[in-house]
Amino acid sequence: METADFRALYDELCPLVWGWVARLGIPRDAIDDVVQEVFLTIYGKLDTFEGRSSLATWVFAITIRVARNYRRRRSAGASGDDSDFDELDALPAHVVHPEAAAEQTEALTLLQQILGELDVEKREVFVLAEIEQLSAPEIASILEISPNTVTSRLRLAREEVRAAWERAKARDQWRLR
């Protein structure tokens, strides 16, 4: 592959990959390293891309695998606290009014906390379906699982997210009394 072609691909996909990595629960201090590893993998495997899926779907599959490998290495090594992760750095705020911006920030923080409580399999499916808007067959292909497993994990993840969201709202209402 030509260096200029890869550079254009990098420029186009880097913001997407960075956001995906952040939403998949990689700590903020490791996001840049994981993104770099994703693009090193892409560079090494780009000649094998057959076009059976979209390029973005193929890149997302690579991103999922690299993130899983990172978590595996991290759990095998010294345990650390992921509390330094703040997804808000990954999501640009397009809100002008300060009150609306504060509400959006609070909602995003709560969503990140809730996603952090999901197990990895449910979080991956939830992020792919609800945030990235991929279909069940696309998710099944990326994660190399059956569409029925995707549907089951997504249903369970939605239930857990909805219940956690309701608990948080109830806590806030109680606190504000």
Image (cartoon, rainbow, N blue to C red):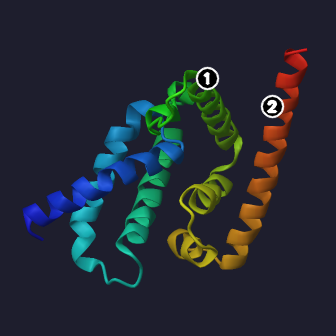
Q: Provide the secondary structure element on which disc 2 rests.
A: helix
Label 1 Cα crowd, 10 Å radius (few <14 / some 14-19 / many 20+)? few
Residue 9, above or below 146: above
Location of mark 2 (residue): 168
Q: In which quarter of the image is residue 90?
A: top left
User: What amino acid type is highlighted by mark number 2?
Assistant: Ala
Q: Which residue is drawn at 57% across and 55% down?
A: 131
Disc marking residue 151:
none
Q: Quadrant of residue 105?
A: top right
Location of mark 1 (residue): 99
Counting from the top left corner in percent of width and height, residue 91 is at 47, 39
User: What amino acid type is highlighted by mark number 1?
Assistant: Glu
Label 2 Cα crowd, 10 Å radius (few <14 / some 14-19 / many 20+)? some
Q: State if disc 2 and disc 1 touch (CB < 8 Å).
A: no
Q: Which residue is drawn at 59% across and 78% down?
A: 137
State left or right for residue 58 relative to residue 71. left
Counting from the top left corner in percent of width and height, residue 28 is at 44, 32
Q: Residue at x 31, y 51 (%)?
A: 14
State left or right for residue 4 relative to residue 167. left
Counting from the top left corner in percent of width and height, residue 148 is at 72, 77
Residue 11, above or below 98: below
Q: In which quarter of the image is residue 92?
A: top left
Residue 152, above or below 92: below
Classify the position of the N terminus by image quarter.
bottom left
